[in-house]
Image (cartoon, grey):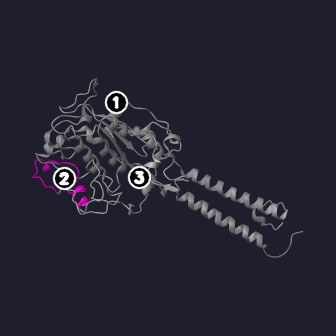
Amino acid sequence: MAKKGCFHFHQVISLFAFAFGVNVCMGFTTNRFRRSEEWDEGPISVLSDSPWISTSGSCKNRCFELQEAEPPGCRCDNLCKSYNSCCFDFDELCLKTARGWECTKDRCGETRNDDNACHCSEDCLSRGDCCTNYQVVCKGETHWVDDDCEEIKTPECPAGFVRPPLIIFSVDGFRASYMKKGNKVMPNIEKLRSCGTHSPYMRPVYPTKTFPNLYTLATGLYPESHGIVGNSMYDPVFDASFSLRGREKFNHRWWGGQPIWITAAKQGVKAGTFFWSVVIPHERRILTILQWLTLPDNERPYVYAFYSEQPDAAGHRYGPFNSEMYTTERALKHIEIWHCYTVPAAPLTRCLETAIVSVQTWVSYALGFMAWHTMLMLLMRISTVTYFTKNMYGKSCRKPFGLDRC
C-alpha cells in the first residue's frame, strides 16, 4: 500500500540531481559550437618572464628578421609578440595596414609612402615590397590562374637561385570537401589542384588535433615518437603542462624528432618558419615571405614552413558550413594567391615548389544529432537515478525518481 504524505528526502535529492545534471549536459551540448580549444576570443597571451628585458632598440629595417636577436636586446622577428620582447616600434613599423594590401589603377606609379602596408610605386620591384597584384594591375601581365596548365619537367628559376624554393603551407581546419567549392570560391587552390598533384584525402594521426598532426607532417613521426600527443598535455616527469597559450610550448624538451627545416639547415640549406602570432595579419605574413624570396642568395631561405590558423578559427566559431566561412576563405585566397604573381624581375611560378596541407578537419554536427545526443544524456541520467533509487531502497519503481512513491 502506498504511503501518504510528501516526497521523501531521497526523492527530493534525486530530483535535484536529475535537474542539475540535465542542465549541465544541455548547456555543454548547445555551447559546443562556440567553443574552441585552440583559438578563442580572449586576449593574446604573452610570456611575462621573458629574458628579453630591453625594448630600447628599433625595428627599422629589421621587420621579421630571420635571426633572433640575443637577449637582452629587443626583437623584431615573428615570435617577438609571443615572447613579449618586441622593440617599442614593432607595431608601427612592422604591422602597417595603411592603403590596404592590393594595388588599384589609381595607385599604380604612386609616390612612395613608407607608411603604406605595401607599395605600387615604380621602385617597389627593386625594393621587394610590392603589393601582391602589382604586376597584374600595374604592368598588365596575365594572372597565372588564367593561363593554361603546362608540364614543367625542369624548374626554370631566375638567376641567383641555386635550387627551387620549397614552401609548405599548413592550413588548419581545411576540410577535403572545401576542394569541391571550385574556382568561383577559391580559384587559385582549384588551379593548383587541376594543374598539379593532389590527394582526395589524407588520413590523420591520432589524436586528430592540430599540434600532433602538424608536427607529424614536419617530422614524419607518429605522436608516440615525437612526443606531441595533444594541444594540451601534462608530463609527470617534467611536472609541467603544455598548451597553445602557455610559454611551455617554446621549451625544446617537449619536441622530439627532427622537423624538415632543421634537417634542411643541417644540410646547409637556409630555412624560414612561421608559426605566427594571430595579431599579425595574413597579408603581412604573405608579403614577408615574398620579401624573403627577394633576399640575396646567401641570405635567402630555400625551405619555408607557413602555418595559418584559418579556417579553423572561424570554423570553431561559426561551424564548417556556415556562410561566414566564405569570408574566411577569402583569407585562404590571400594565402594561395601570392605566388601566382610575378616576383621581382623574373617569374617564380615556374620555379617554386608548393605544398598545401591541412592538419585538421571537421565533423559536421547537425541539429538532429544534437537533439538525439541531448535525449541520450537525459535517458542516461534517468536510468542512473532510477537504478540508484531501486538499489538503495529495494523497490523497483517503473517511473523515474520514484514519483509513484512505490
Determine crowd level at label 3: few under 14, some 14-19, many 20+ residues with C-alpha closer than 10 A: few
- Mark 1 / mark 2, whichever is N-terminal: 2
Could you say where residue 378 lies in the image, as x and y percent from the top left?
66, 58
Amino acid on which disc 3 is placed: Phe
Residue 105 forms part of the magenta stretch: yes
Q: Which residue is mark 2?
A: 61
Q: Taking 285 as reference, is 257 above or below it?
A: above
Name the residue located 30 percent from the left edge and 46 percent from the top edge: 334
Main SS, magenta region, reads: loop
- Mark 3 / mark 2, whichever is N-terminal: 2
Q: Which residues are magenta?
A: 89-114
Which circle, 3 or 1, is nearer the viewer?
3
Could you say where residue 301 lies in the image, as x and y percent from the top left?
27, 40
Quadrant where the image shows the C terminus: bottom right
Q: Are dots 3 and 2 in contact, CB under 8 Å?
A: no
Q: Which residue is mark 3?
A: 250
Quadrant where the image shows the N terminus: bottom right
Q: Which residue is mark 1?
A: 196
Determine crowd level at label 1: few under 14, some 14-19, many 20+ residues with C-alpha closer than 10 A: some
